[in-house]
Image (tube, rainbow, N blue to C red):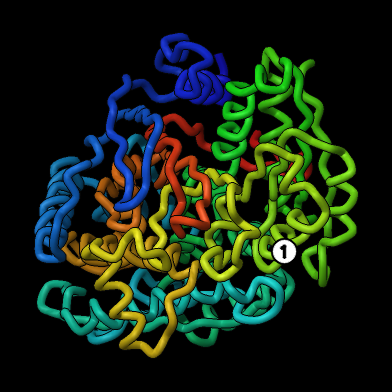
Amino acid sequence: MTPRRCIALVLMAIAGLGSITACGDDGGGGGTEDAASQPPAATSTSSATTTSGRASARNDAPSSMEEWEDLWKEERADIVERIQDESWGKAADGRTITGPEGFTIDLSKCPTGWSDTEGTTDTDIKIGFTLPQSGPAAEGGGIGYAQEALFAHYNAEKVFTDHGKTRNVTMILRDDGYDAARTIPLVDELIDSEKVFAIETAGSPSLLRTYDKLNQRCIPQVMPSSGHPALGDPVNHPWTTSSSMSYATEAVMWGAFLEKRLDEFGGKAKVVSLRINSDFGASYNSAFEAYLASSEHRDDIEYKSVTFEPTAATVKDEMTTLAAEHADMFIAMTTGASCTQLLNEAANNGMKQETKYRFLASACKAVTPVTKLGDDPDGWWTVGGGVKDATIAAYDSDPFIVAARGWAEQAGREVTASFNLGYYYGWNIAQALQIAGQLDGGVTRSNLILALRSIDMTNPMLLGGLRVGMNGNADAYVLEGSDISRWSTADQTWVQDSVVALDGQTPNCAWDLATSRCR
């Protein structure tokens, strides 16, 4: 059985459609364990967690920042101990880096003059980030602003220590307008002129046009803002880490959700999607098509997709076309301003009333200010990526959210939807830098990557039952799980139907640009 089909079976089992025992060890081993929880003021009708080789996620979340920090200190110590016990890291001759499950980087292939500590001084660590701060995807700029606020807090706490040195993290943000053609020269500027220690990028198109260069230059590309399957490639792109749940896994969860409910439509259903015409949209679409092709219900589900250009000012015509299909399920495979536009169009063209299940992609949830859109988002569903929403009242008593809101206020920023991902990504990087500082050699590019490839921790921005973790070449996806939730305008919260964890179940992916599929 292929790993991809194993994921389908696991998710179908969670949806009540089959048994996961058929997977055996193909998807990474492991059994099942209940471990779902929900935020204040939310409800959950079902829950399931599948874990594989990682410590169980916590349900008894700490009740204060002091308790959180104590937990993270213990988790970092466990990771450092594992790395040291296994003698992973840079070899004595400086030619290789080793890590979990055969993870290896050949440093002899790095360019002449490459430095493991470039971008650092005795007092500073520079991280460059290209992301949209203007244009249709400008809301995504909050990811960078949130990280600035988070690092300002940690800088003040003096947590980035390294064998007697204490450093501050400096973020250098560059606006690429969600245009990969603009990303490329900005990345060149950051690595050649600013000489940054590490790079972040935002969006799948930008990722796929920069990760070859950054890996050839041996520069960490950490937590790129994308769930593209190509991020799960530790062999060919060891310097590029994943950051979110894979879009391929999200697409499988859409399919499993629908199959569970086919009887509601007499055993046959029509699905339509609106997708952005980019590598990002293509990854969603190809994964969903692959799931349907392998489903025993493939003859019972009709699927049609319509594209729009990333630069389009509106999606009115495309949404009108899709409304005329009178579908049973709609999926938004997009991000940025188009998410808000399609919610409005669906409310006006009858789709909201006629199409029973309407899904926003996790990338839409991450940037869409649903609390400010009135009734338009009411009743919409999402496979939301498992990240808490700092903009809603449901988390007013969450100690990390309360603190994070304060950091944004101190930075003179308003917390918006994209701040959620910014805090989630930034926290991962902050923990990895603290781990690296405890390893032989201290804060180096090698140790940063090793820390991330070995991470196994409780990220405070994730819902209960989910955690972050990578395991070298065996498991390249740092997050494998999500909530399945529905927006309630009356309650102003995402109401959880379930939380699904699939640690170790998403197969790695060497992406083929020509076919838009994993090889």
Residue 151 coordinates in the image, percent (x, y): 31, 77
Could you say which is closer to the camera, residue 219 or residue 403?
403
Q: Residue at x 43, y 42 (%)?
A: 496
Picture quadrant where residue 318 is located: bottom right
Q: Residue at x 58, y 26 (%)?
A: 256
256 sits left or right of 338 in the view: left
Residue 123 shows up from this direction: yes
Residue 64 coordinates in the image, percent (x, y): 13, 63
Residue 416 coordinates in the image, percent (x, y): 48, 73
Residue 283 coordinates in the image, percent (x, y): 68, 45
47 sits left or right of 1 in the view: left
Residue under numbered circle 1: 338
**Element under label 1?**
helix
Quadrant position of the N terminus in the picture: top right
Could you say which is closer to the camera, residue 213 or residue 38?
38
Q: Is residue 486 above or below residue 108?
A: above
Judge the density around disc 1: few (<14), some (14-19), many (≥20) Cα neighbours within 10 Å: many
Picture quadrant where residue 289 is located: top right
